[in-house]
Image: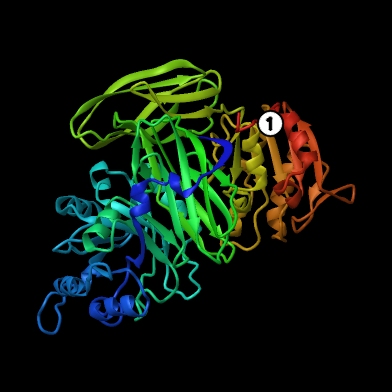
Amino acid sequence: MRFKVVWLFIVSSLFLPSIVEAGIYFGNLHAHTAYSDGQGDPAQAFQHARNIAGLDFQAVTDHAYYFVQPLADGSDKFTKTREYAEDFTEPGVFVAIAGFEWTGTGYGHINIYNTKGWISRDQADLFRLYEWIVKHKALAQFNHPVREFGDNFREFLYFPEVDKYINLIEVGNGNWAAGDIISEEMEAAYRDALRKGWHVGATANQDNHKPNWGSANDARTAVIAENLSYDSIMEALKRRHVYATEDKNARVFLFAGSAMMGDILYDATRVTLHMSFEDIGDPVSCATLVTSHREIPVPVSGDSWDYSTDVRVEYNYEWVYLRIKQKDGDNVVTSPIWFQSSSKHYALNPSIFPTRPTQGEKFVLRFDLVNWSEQAEFVNLSVCLSGNPIFDQTFELQPISRLSTNIELSAEEEGPLQVYVDGELAWEGYLHLTQFSAILDTTHENGYEFENSELLLWLESVGGRVEVLRGRMRANSLKGKRLLILPLPESGGIAPIIKKLNTKEIGIIVDHVSKGGLLILVSAKEPIESDVVDTYNTLLKRLGFEATFSNDGTKILEDGEEKKLVSLSFGQGYVLVGSHDFVLHPEAELEELLTELLGVNFVDDEE
């Protein structure tokens, strides 16, 4: 999706009539009572939400595994919740919703609404729950997608049939008074679900376990609906016409052509994306359009504004949502608008492994090939590198199905990589070839601090592929590796013997360098045992160095002086011995030396 840097002021007359006529209603879709692990009963929850919190709608979603225990009069807890919901619903005033929460250990939690029956974690794992949801055509919501509760539904493994019914996802969840419940972790999970193919709208809920239903803070799920009735609210939830807000009355619209947030717009090539915000007295500090591929700042300010931008749709499957941050710290996250091909054939969640193959090395292009059609269909998939076809195959996909696809390819040159589905551009990226391979040793209770370090990031930026050596160093561990990074061990540890280099390992390292390999030896960050340091000094001696590590390993000494870097050629290779911080946070001196030794140039990932 390409966004032109031209912003147009739009007046209210440009709003679609259907949106103007719709209302925005604020409520809470996640709460508990004493029917599970909360307090009070559903009647108290609905009454409090309506009369005290001033909500337009409230759902009670007790944990289903508590339902096996009936109430004192023998009645079913969920049936009673449904009865209370019906009693407290008053069109135009308040909508009460009965639901339940399925809490799958290791998977995550899911709320289910608008069903006559219930199912608990003791009756179904995640995938059987999905079958139950489809069978009952139940509206559902991914709850608080954070690691604390599981692996995010097996990392949002996509099922097109289930996607029809799981229409919501929490980007905010919390019962604390501060109200800062929309988190970066949950919003990142939201984007991950969207990338995998799920069509879910953003919600923010209080997950009440105390008698403060709707009044714990100002966080709300906002629903854009025709009117405040049960059917209208439920229909809007199913259509994802929702946004998550930490402000109790922030009014937000996002639409493109005939589609508003939560909708799918088919076969659009260019549209005007409109957005509107109003929260008198609470101005915004920034706004951002978050797309399938990038984030675009929106130049807005104030507590009431309307803006639009032209959008060029480049791929056969894209999405965009709006994120707003107010000056008081409150956040708003909308549901997306999807731009999709009416072919209903898509290639989602692409990845390349290894991410930087070497020249001629086989690599795997992975993605999910999806057929949204209600019938089995043939789907053509083709791949081009630098405009030249390198793969073309037709697959047969079952109705409403996903086919995990792995394509084995190789390339002699790097360049732009495009994936086409039925001739429509589905994805593109840039294939970078590895110019060298490096390996970080962590087999001697060492190197952990260097994982994801500035050094490794820099090596990757200049075309390197960095692996981590774990377990034991063997004769073939360094095969094909241009560079070995060998930090001295860290202080402490459970087995000092593991920290030492043995005679065989010293021989492997010396052989690696003599045959043309590069070695970076790094001093210890904190003092370590002298007998451990002795083994690394033995390696230095075998490599021809007069320099040594100090007895505690923290300094590099040459002719009695402390050095931050010493270097020496050995055989066909080269050795660098650097101080801990000098190597961990490389500066120009080290980068220039490594660039020369590795024979590489800087790689621009934006190419």
Q: Which residue occupies the foreground of this view, 268 or 133?
A: 268
Q: Which residue is drawn at 48% across and 51% down?
A: 276
Q: Which residue is drawn at 23% across and 33% down?
A: 373
Q: Residue at x 50, y 36 (%)?
A: 310
Q: Name the residue under label 1.
A: 602
Q: Furthest residue to the bottom?
A: 72
Q: Is residue 227 left or right of residue 584?
A: left
Quadrant housing residue 87: bottom left
Residue 332 drawn above or below residue 86: above
Position of residue 253 measured from the top left corner of the image (x, y, whole percent): 43, 52
Q: How many labels does the image show?
A: 1
Q: Furthest residue to the front?
A: 13
Residue 369 drawn above or below residue 441: above
Task: Please state which amino acid type lies under the numbered disc 1.
Answer: Phe
SS label for mark 1: loop
| Quarter of the figure that contains the C terminus | top right
Position of residue 103 measured from the top left corner of the image (x, y, whole percent): 28, 64
Q: Which residue occupies the foreground of this view, 228 or 511?
A: 228
Q: Which residue occupies the foreground of this view, 201 or 451?
A: 201
Q: Furthest residue to the left?
A: 74
Position of residue 335 measured from the top left corner of the image (x, y, whole percent): 40, 51
Q: Which residue occupies the foreground of this view, 234 or 524?
A: 234
